[in-house]
Image: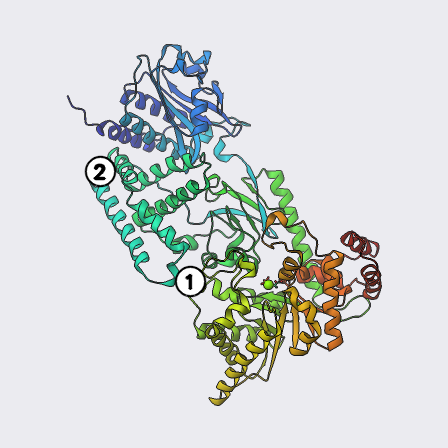
């Protein structure tokens, strides 16, 4: 008789469904499940081992082995056949198990009489939760359809484990791996501490409807969904839209290839024929793949596998008709978003008031999403490899954006310690709020302007909250970076107008678009060739002078937005003075144009330059004469003076801006400004750390611009600082012979001696 290969698994799944619906105690349910599996597969043994948090696999149910061994027999991860399956996330199919080198004999089970062995991992979203085994006395090799059937059954068991049903059988101290606390160390991207609950970005959709009623119908649904998926990818590829050039295109090409991959589709169809719904089939095939991906080391293949992962998610969404809107609506109040990677615009889709933190598996401190998160004041930790597959929606989680650590499902004492840390930070914030009322003056009465850096509409409420004297750097390129095409002139004008409205007369310095370098616009590929050194390449003012249309549009938007008010415009990455002259010509032409059409013009227009390129250091007086103000971009200036890439984490702490040479550079600039009566500001990250802000004041700066969160701590330092004393202390140390002085330590000691809070 020819056996209908799919009938067996289908019957079994139907049985399992009935068992799941019955009001049974968890142990009873497990016992019945293993009995049914054994009967269906004509096996003499069926056993389930569940992975505990201490990496031990415990026998939870069996038919065929000694029943007294249940909850007693155990194997470490990697030990024996069962441990090997769990560690490798791969099935083992053996006709004579005892001959396998990993075989470990557990006398309490009485398993010595069984020869053939088939074990499959119990997987959920790429994590191994346990191992399901069948055994027979005869030496036989299990067929592929039997392996498939056991894997499908294992998936049902994975759902039972994830639902918490089986966890009720665990003994105190021997909890299941699913609820194991896990900590990850990566990189701190934005400071702050967040406690909350996991929200998986593009979450793996939890498939609860596992069993199909009609395989043909499910196959049709899969076919339809695959069809629409392929169409949508082709559609995106055909749009001759600049947004899809370069990397985007490559990813889409890869998606198209995968969506047509016969092997993938065949595995999906097979799973449906075995009785799963189309959704459950996608989840199963993907789970197998994810588990294997965890053991793959080739970064290229891993990347391709994650493309597959994304594609499977898209397919699931097609099948379930779910969009991102529903996800945002169901966000908890203390959401911590956990993502493999994310675009900046996607972060903006989440409501700010419900987000407590962001965790990224990838990312760099300069990636757009991190810039936006920083602007929104969200703690961010990145490079957390494996965080996504270890997290479940709703898991408690802590993000420590100061240390670059996350704690998943933390123990109560750790949670309490962090809650205290959060309370401490809140008290400090309260103190800073109090400080807002105090004048921004040193202890000896010298007035200092504390300004804030901004770049997006989401930043603006912080102007009042932080008590900033104005916006010292408005990074206009951020609007371009979070968009998918060039923002239209009207959108630019609106943003600038909003900024000026909210600033209510406080000064705002708009920097013209600073793109290029690490700030790439996916939709703009102006340069024909790949740049070998983009930081030294075609960027900022160099780029906008070569594409004057960009600059003209922006300048016109700025002039219109500032009608009847003061306008300050600043040029990034100036290298030689002729660049300022050229930009001024473009601006003047726009002013003439607007006045010809009787537009309301700004009451005054000031043009400034950033000092970021060392060439300006040898023409400081001429520079000061040719602009209305300057601002030191210490991030770039430091990287060029030290020849040390600002984005290279390996070099991050190698050179110190608070060293004699760099402090001398900073002092020369401040001196030149004073000599020429040209206002000088500094707007790099240096301004935001109390110790370096103190040094800046000591070498002559009276205006510094920083992220809004830094204003409180810097002001706390400022109001306790005897500036006269610090000035003579620094003058002495910087003007003497160029000894290798530990300036940071000296500054720290200066502050400690005077109880200045740093
Ligand atoms: C700088 O370089 O210091 C600066 C403020 O500009 P950005 O960080 O945007 O390059
Ligand atoms: Mg810069």
Q: Position of residue 433 (x, y in %)?
A: 68, 63
Residue that badge 1 annotates: 523
1 and 2 marks in contact (CB < 8 Å): no
Q: Which of 302/417 is in front?
A: 302
Determine the secondary structure under disc 2: helix
Q: Is disc 1 surrounded by few (<14), some (14 to 19) or many (20+) residues within 10 Å?
A: some
**Residue 318 % position (x, y):** 31, 50
Q: Could you tell me if residue 439 is visible in this image?
A: no
| Image quarter for ligand 2 | bottom right
In the rendering, at what x and y percent does residue 250 appear? 38, 52
SS of the residue at dot 1? loop
The figure's colour scheme reads: rainbow
Up the image or down, 277 lies above or below 726; here it is: above
The mark found on residue 400 in the picture is: none
For label 2, the crowd category at 10 Å Cα-Cα, with few meaning under 14, some 14 to 19 and many 20 or more, is many
Task: Where is residue 408? Give x, y as percent.
Answer: 54, 41
The residue singled out by tag 2 in the image is 215
Image quadrant for the C terminus?
A: bottom right
> Where is the N terminus found, in terms of image quarters?
top left
Please tell me whether residue 417 is drawn above or below residue 454 in the rendered image: above
Q: Nearer the viewer, residue 344 or 26?
A: 344
Q: 420 or 528: which is nearer to us?
A: 528
Q: Is mark 2 within 8 Å of ligand 1?
A: no
Tell us which disc is closer to us: 1 or 2: 1
* Residue positioned most to the top: 113
């Amino acid at each position: 008789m020819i056996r209908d290969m799919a009938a067996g698994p289908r019957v079994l799944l139907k049985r399992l469904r009935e068992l799941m619906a019955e009001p049974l105690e968890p142990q009873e349910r497990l016992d019945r499940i293993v009995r049914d599996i054994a009967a269906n597969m004509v096996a003499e043994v069926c056993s389930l081992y569940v992975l505990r948090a201490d990496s031990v696999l415990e026998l939870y149910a069996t038919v065929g082995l000694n029943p007294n061994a249940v909850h007693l027999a155990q194997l470490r991860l990697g030990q024996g056949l069962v441990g090997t399956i769990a560690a490798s996330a791969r099935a083992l199919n053996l006709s004579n198990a005892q001959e396998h080198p990993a075989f470990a004999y557990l006398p309490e089970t009485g398993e010595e009489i069984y020869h053939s062995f088939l074990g499959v991992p119990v997987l959920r979203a790429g994590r191994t939760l346990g191992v399901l085994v069948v055994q027979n006395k005869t030496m036989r090799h299990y067929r592929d359809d039997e392996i498939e059937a056991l894997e499908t059954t294992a998936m049902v068991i994975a759902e039972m484990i994830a639902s918490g049903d089986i966890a009720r059988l665990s003994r105190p101290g021997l909890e299941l791996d699913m609820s194991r606390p896990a900590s990850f160390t990566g990189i701190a991207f934005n400071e702050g501490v967040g406690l909350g609950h996991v929200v998986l970005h593009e979450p793996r959709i939890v498939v609860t409807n596992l069993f199909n009623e009609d395989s043909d119908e499910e196959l049709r649904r899969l076919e339809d969904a695959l069809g629409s998926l392929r169409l949508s990818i082709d559609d995106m590829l055909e749009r001759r839209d600049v947004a899809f050039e370069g990397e985007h295109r490559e990813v889409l090409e890869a998606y198209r290839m995968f969506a047509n991959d016969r092997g993938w589709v065949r595995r999906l169809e097979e799973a449906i024929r075995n009785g799963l719904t189309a959704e459950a089939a996608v989840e199963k095939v993907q789970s197998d793949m994810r588990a294997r991906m965890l053991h793959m080391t080739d970064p290229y293949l891993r990347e391709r596998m994650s493309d597959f992962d994304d594609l499977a998610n898209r397919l699931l969404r097609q099948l379930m008709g779910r969009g991102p809107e529903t996800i945002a609506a169901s966000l908890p109040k203390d959401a911590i978003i956990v993502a493999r990677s994310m675009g900046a615009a996607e972060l903006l889709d989440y409501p700010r008031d419900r987000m407590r933190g962001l965790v990224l598996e990838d990312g760099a401190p300069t990636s757009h999403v991190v810039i936006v998160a920083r602007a929104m004041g969200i703690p961010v930790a990145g490079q957390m490899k494996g965080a996504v597959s270890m997290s479940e929606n709703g898991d408690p989680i802590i993000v420590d954006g100061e240390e670059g650590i996350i704690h998943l499902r933390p123990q109560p004492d750790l949670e309490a310690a962090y809650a205290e840390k959060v309370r401490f930070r809140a008290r400090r914030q309260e103190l800073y709020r109090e400080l807002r009322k105090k004048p921004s003056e040193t202890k000896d009465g010298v007035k200092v302007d504390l300004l804030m850096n901004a770049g997006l509409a989401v930043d603006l409420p912080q102007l009042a909250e932080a008590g900033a004297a104005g916006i010292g750097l408005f990074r206009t390129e951020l609007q371009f970076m979070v968009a998918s095409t060039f923002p239209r002139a009207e959108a630019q004008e609106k943003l600038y107008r909003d900024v000026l409205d909210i600033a209510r007369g406080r000064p705002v310095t708009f920097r013209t678009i600073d793109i290029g370098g690490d700030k790439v616009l996916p939709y703009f590929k102006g340069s024909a060739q790949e740049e070998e050194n983009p930081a030294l390449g075609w960027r900022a003012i160099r780029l906008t002078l070569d594409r004057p249309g960009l600059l003209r549009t922006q300048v016109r938007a700025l002039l219109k937005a500032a009608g009847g008010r003061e306008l300050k415009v600043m040029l990034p990455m100036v290298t030689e003075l002729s660049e300022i002259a050229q930009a001024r010509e473009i601006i003047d032409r726009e002013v003439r144009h607007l006045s010809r059409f009787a537009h309301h013009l700004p009451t005054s227009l000031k043009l400034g330059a950033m000092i970021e390129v060392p060439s300006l250091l040898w023409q400081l007086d001429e520079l000061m004469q040719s602009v209305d103000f300057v601002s030191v971009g210490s991030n770039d200036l430091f990287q060029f003076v030290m020849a040390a890439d600002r984005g290279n984490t390996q070099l991050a702490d190698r050179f110190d801006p608070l060293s004699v040479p760099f402090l001398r550079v900073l002092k020369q600039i401040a001196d030149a400004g004073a000599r020429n009566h040209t206002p000088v500001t500094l707007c790099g990250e240096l301004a935001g750390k109390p110790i370096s802000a103190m040094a800046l004041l000591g070498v002559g700066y009276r205006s510094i611009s920083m992220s809004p969160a830094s204003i409180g701590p810097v002001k706390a330092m400022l109001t306790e600082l005897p500036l006269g004393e610090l000035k003579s202390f620094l003058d002495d140390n910087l003007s003497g012979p160029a000894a290798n002085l530990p300036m940071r330590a000296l500054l720290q000691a200066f502050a400690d001696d005077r109880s200045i809070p740093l």
